[in-house]
Image (cartoon, grey):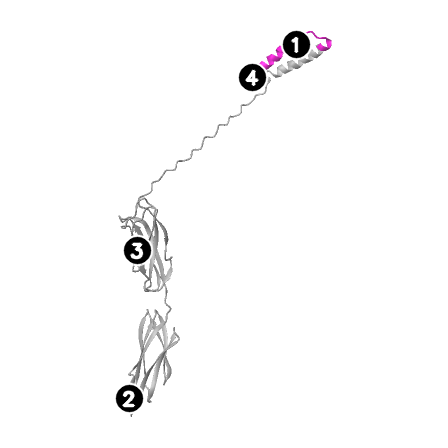
Amino acid sequence: MSKKDFHIYTALTILACIQLACSFSFGPDEKDTLAKEQTSVAQTIEALKPENLPTLEAQPTEEPPEPTVQPTKANTPKPCNDAQFISETIPDDSEFDAGAGFTKSWRFKNTGTCTWNTNYELVFKSGDQMGAPASKALSGEVAPGETVDIGINMTAPASAGTYQGYWKLVDDNGDNLINNVWVKIKVKSEPFVVTSVNLVAIPPGFAGPCPFPFQFTADITSSGPGTVTYFWESSIFGQYDHVSLNFAAAGTKTVSTIESPFFSGLHWMKIYIDDPNHQYFGPVNYTLNCIP
């Protein structure tokens, strides 16, 4: 039943009840009371007419939310050959003495589905090879999920500076598994110093007329490039010849001087390296016997 039909049915019911009440006899007071009630009922019926009833707006019905569908994750198959870099030894910019040997190692994990065999290898790619072999093969099989360490023996170059070499891990077909790992070191600069001086008197002795000229040579060896300053010092004439000597690289250079003693005796000559050593080398002894 609609709301409109319900209101009409209610009004007719009330009207029937009033008509039934009118069929009974009432006294004078009761008639006045009844008349008032009939008036009230008539007003109620008028108010209940459909055209006098308030319009009820239909409330929108909320629809239930649609269920959320979780996306299905696709299972991507793992490749046969796949690798992951795990760790390494010899951090970048590690310092080594010139010519020092060392071993650089990398650790890799087999993240594929195929077992690595001994034809898988680490191959030199570019840069500074530092005395290493061109490649290093695996020493045994590596199953999926396992790790392997590959070490390469290398030698620090002879000159100071920074050196870097690049390597790659390849499968048994030569295809790249990991295309770029590297070793990067620094060769330490040796402090510039004169490491030795070989001092000689030519001849070591003489007998005859004086004065006689003796020649003195000094083979000066440096540890690297730089400038050496030095002077000679003798038992007869003291210090003289303050000289500079330039080295383009580590090596040995020969310097010389001549001294002519005029009296007999046992004499000596030495050389002082002022810079960088602040050090005497020698003396070298020689004898002179003056014969008129």
- Magenta-colored span: 1-30
Numbered tag placed on residue 4 in the rendering: 4
- Please tell me how many numbered marks the rendered image carries: 4
Is residue 210 visible in the rendered image? The answer is no
* Mark 4 and mark 2: Cα distance apart in space: 156 Å
Secondary structure of the residue carrying numbered label 4 = helix
Location of mark 2 (residue): 207
Location of mark 3 (residue): 126
168 and 259: which is toward the camera: 168
Tell me if residue 27 is in the magenta stretch: yes
* Mark 1 and mark 4: Cα distance apart in space: 26 Å
Secondary structure of the residue carrying numbered label 3 = strand
Q: Considering only order in the chain, which callout, 2 or 4, is on the residue closer to the N terminus?
A: 4
x and y percent of residue 17 in the render?
Answer: 63, 11
Judge depth for marks 1 and 4 and give the one in front.
1
Q: Considering only order in the chain, which callout, 4 or 1, is on the residue closer to the N terminus?
A: 4
Judge depth for marks 4 and 2 and give the one in front.
2
Q: Most extreme residue toward the right, as rendered?
A: 29
Q: Residues within 10 Å of mark 2 (few under 14, many from 20)?
A: few
Q: Residues within 10 Å of mark 1 (few under 14, many from 20)?
A: few
Please tell me which residue is depicted at 71% across the width and 10% down the height of the picture: 30
Label 1 with label 3: CB-CB less than 8 Å: no
Q: Considering only order in the chain, which callout, 3 or 4, is on the residue closer to the N terminus?
A: 4
Location of mark 1 (residue): 21
Would you place residue 124 above or below residue 12 in this image?
Answer: below
Q: Amino acid at mark 4?
A: Lys
Would you place residue 62 above or below residue 289 in this image?
Answer: above
Q: Amino acid at mark 2?
A: Ala
Would you place residue 139 above or below residue 70 in this image?
Answer: below
Q: Considering only order in the chain, which callout, 3 or 1, is on the residue closer to the N terminus?
A: 1
* Mark 4 and mark 3: Cα distance apart in space: 94 Å
x and y percent of residue 241 in the render?
Answer: 36, 80
